[in-house]
């Protein structure tokens, strides 16, 4: 039911953009609305995904599509928040809120939620008209980290995911971190899943299922699940290395 709803949502967005002649660009995308992988029914992660890097022509099409589709899909998200059960943001735990683009007018709301820092997965052009830059948030006493990732077609790289998780962990106990992209469904949800795995020692499906319960309209495609799985594997590899190099492990081996 929810998957068909998201499919309709995706088709609506493409209809808005159809007159601009950009629907063809969506065909070059590995993330299609009919093939999303979500939490809910097990939240299983396909570890056999093969991701092929796009060529120069596809990269250009992707950049253009992401930019031209930004405002129509942003307004669509505003509309959906007004007429459906979707929230603009949802609390994931005591440390993190996962949400859509925080408008400048939301400062009082963020203060009421004890937000002390913001992580934005948006590119610069997405923040220009309605949201704040690092300096703008600093004027309200809010720390800001930007980890720009292209909308729709990309997942955050491992370096950005690691930086974002460390940022959240370093602020733990001092207030809430508001993690967002445009809609709070894909790019930012990928980062929050990695935080949950790091913080609670969860598996990917546990992290995704928890987010799905808190924010039912998250939308994670193959690339996002691949990034989450890779982050989880790196976590396990680091734990294994730490155990092997720990003084206790060394002394045990010497015995």
Image: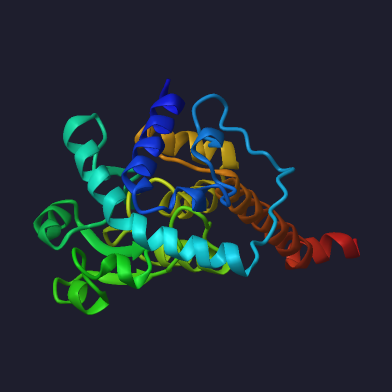
At horizontal 53% and vertical 65% (from top left) the residue drawn is: 162
Q: Position of residue 252 (x, y in %)?
A: 84, 59
Q: Is residue 46 above or below residue 123?
A: above
At horizontal 62% and vertical 33% (from top left) the residue drawn is: 44
Q: Position of residue 132 (x, y in %)?
A: 21, 70
For the rendered model, the colour scheme is rainbow
**Image quadrant of residue 9?**
top left
The answer to whether 51 appears left or right of 170 in the picture is right
Instruction: Give the quadrant of the N terminus.
Output: top left
Query: Closest to the observer: 139 or 95?
Result: 139
Instruction: Give the quadrant of the C terminus.
Output: bottom right
Q: Is residue 88 above or below residue 243?
A: above
User: Can the viewer see residue 167?
Assistant: yes
Q: Position of residue 64 (x, y in %)?
A: 43, 64
User: Can the viewer see residue 158?
Assistant: no
Q: Is residue 2 above or below residue 150?
A: above
Q: Position of residue 186 (x, y in %)?
A: 44, 48
Numbered disc total = 0
**Image quadrant of residue 115?**
bottom left
At horizontal 58% and vertical 52% (from top left) the residue drawn is: 28
């Amino acid at each position: 039911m929810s998957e068909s709803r998201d499919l309709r949502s995706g088709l609506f967005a493409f209809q808005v953009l159809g007159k601009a002649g950009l629907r063809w660009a969506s065909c070059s995308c590995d993330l299609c609305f009919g093939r999303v992988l979500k939490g809910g029914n097990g939240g299983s992660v396909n570890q056999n995904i093969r991701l092929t890097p796009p060529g120069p022509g596809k990269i250009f099409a992707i950049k253009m599509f992401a930019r031209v589709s930004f405002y129509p899909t942003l307004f669509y998200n505003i509309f959906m928040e007004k007429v459906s059960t979707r929230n603009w943001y949802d609390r994931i735990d005591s440390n993190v809120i996962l949400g859509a683009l925080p408008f400048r007018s939301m400062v009082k709301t963020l203060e009421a939620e004890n937000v002390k820092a913001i992580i934005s997965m948006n590119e610069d052009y997405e923040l220009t008209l309605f949201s704040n830059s690092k300096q703008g948030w600093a004027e309200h006493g809010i720390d800001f980290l930007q980890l720009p990732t292209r909308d729709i077609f990309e997942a955050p790289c491992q370096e950005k995911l690691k930086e974002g998780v460390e940022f959240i962990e370093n602020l733990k106990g001092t207030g809430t971190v508001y993690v967002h992209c445009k809609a709070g469904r894909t790019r930012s949800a990928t980062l929050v899943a990695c935080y949950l795995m790091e913080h609670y020692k969860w598996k990917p499906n546990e992290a995704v299922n928890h987010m799905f319960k808190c924010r039912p309209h998250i939308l994670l495609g193959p690339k996002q699940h691949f990034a989450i799985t890779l982050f989880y594997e790196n976590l396990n590899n680091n734990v294994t290395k730490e155990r092997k190099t720990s003084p206790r492990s060394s002394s045990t081996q010497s015995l």
